[in-house]
Image: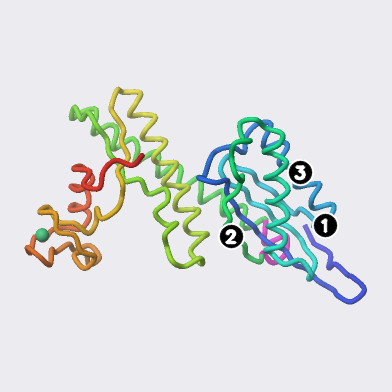
Amino acid sequence: MEQEYRKTRTTVSLINYHFVFCPRYRRKVLINKVEERFKQLVAGICQENDWIIVAMEVMPDHCHLFLNCLPTDSPSDVMARVKGVTSRRLRQEFKQLSHLPSLWTRSFFVSTAGNAKKLQAIKKSKDKESHWMKDQNHKIRRQIVNYAISNGVGVIRMEDLTDIRNTAKSKKTDQGRNLHSWSFYQLKEFIKYKAEMFGIRFELVNPEYTSQTCKNGHQARANRNGLKFRCKECGHACHADVNGAINIAKAISGLAS
Ligand SMILES: [Zn+2]
């Protein structure tokens, strides 16, 4: 699809933004009637503001929005408008959302996205990547659950990594975080579902310090160096992932709520 340059009295432009934003706590609320109404509202907002929807992909817990804008529209203004209106209206119209103080997190991802041809390519590679990730997650899930079944394991524990990247200092990592936590979330759901099917308990462990603490309870950031773990206090050394796994098994930082 070839896109036209947009002309105003004083400008000629072709500005496409790729936005990604999520409901608070990554709640999977963008489904069924809510999803339908959300799309309607976005269409209305964009029409009012002269933003052209190039593509919109709504997932239960996040939304990709490709908009063609004018040079006077800042990405922050666009997001504020889209989130503000949809948050207010959806919370008014759907009882299950009415108790939330706001529907969306305050953060968003945005990148410039070239022309529409490029957008198609992005979408295609995204689909490919998410298929690949899904396939990997199924393989991992199968191995873990099969091992547990054949060895009579009663509990499967995983670190709760859903929000771990939220604490990352750099906002630039947002896109990576979204992909990362999405694939982790998917793996977690796969394992949980299968484990419970076979009567295996599934628990999430608080990820704090699991990679920094030795078996004798000494915790220091410097204990971990890449794949190597070596306690500065007592000298205990092993593979960092093995050390982490033992701490997860012991749930040293407690279960995640
Ligand atoms: Zn130690």
Determine whether, in the image, residue 180 is placed left or right of residue 213.
Answer: right
Residue 26's place in the image compared with 210, above or below, is above
Residue 103's place in the image compared with 120, above or below, is above
**Which residue corresponds to mark 3?**
41
**Which residue corresponds to mark 2?**
109
Q: Which residues are magenta?
A: 113-119
Residue 249 on the magenta segment: no
Disc 3 and disc 1: Cα gap in Å? 12 Å
Say what amino acid the circle numbered 3 marks.
Leu
Instruction: Residue 152: give x, y in percent of width and height.
Output: 19, 27
**Circles 1 and 2: CB distance less than 8 Å?**
no
Q: Nearer the viewer, residue 241 or 1?
A: 241
Disc 1 and disc 2: Cα gap in Å? 20 Å
Q: Disc 3 on helix, strand or loop? A: helix
Say what amino acid the circle numbered 2 marks.
Phe
**Toward which corner of the image does residue 17 lie, by quadrant?**
bottom right
Task: Dividing the image into four quarters, tell me where ligand 1 lies.
Answer: bottom left
**Which residue corresponds to mark 1?**
49
Instruction: Residue 85: give x, y in percent of width and height.
Output: 73, 48
Residue 117 on the magenta segment: yes
Instruction: Residue 91: give x, y in percent of width and height.
Output: 67, 38
Q: Nearer the viewer, residue 176 or 129?
A: 176
Say what amino acid the circle numbered 1 marks.
Asn
Q: Disc 1 on helix, strand or loop? A: helix
Determine whether, in the image, residue 108 is placed left or right of residue 244.
Answer: right
Mark 3 CB in 8 Å range of ligand 1? Answer: no
Q: Disc 2 on helix, strand or loop? A: strand
Q: Earlier in the sequence, mark 1 or mark 2?
A: 1
Determine whether, in the image, residue 189 is placed left or right of residue 72.
Answer: left
Residue ID at (18%, 52%): 242
Q: Earlier in the sequence, mark 3 or mark 2?
A: 3
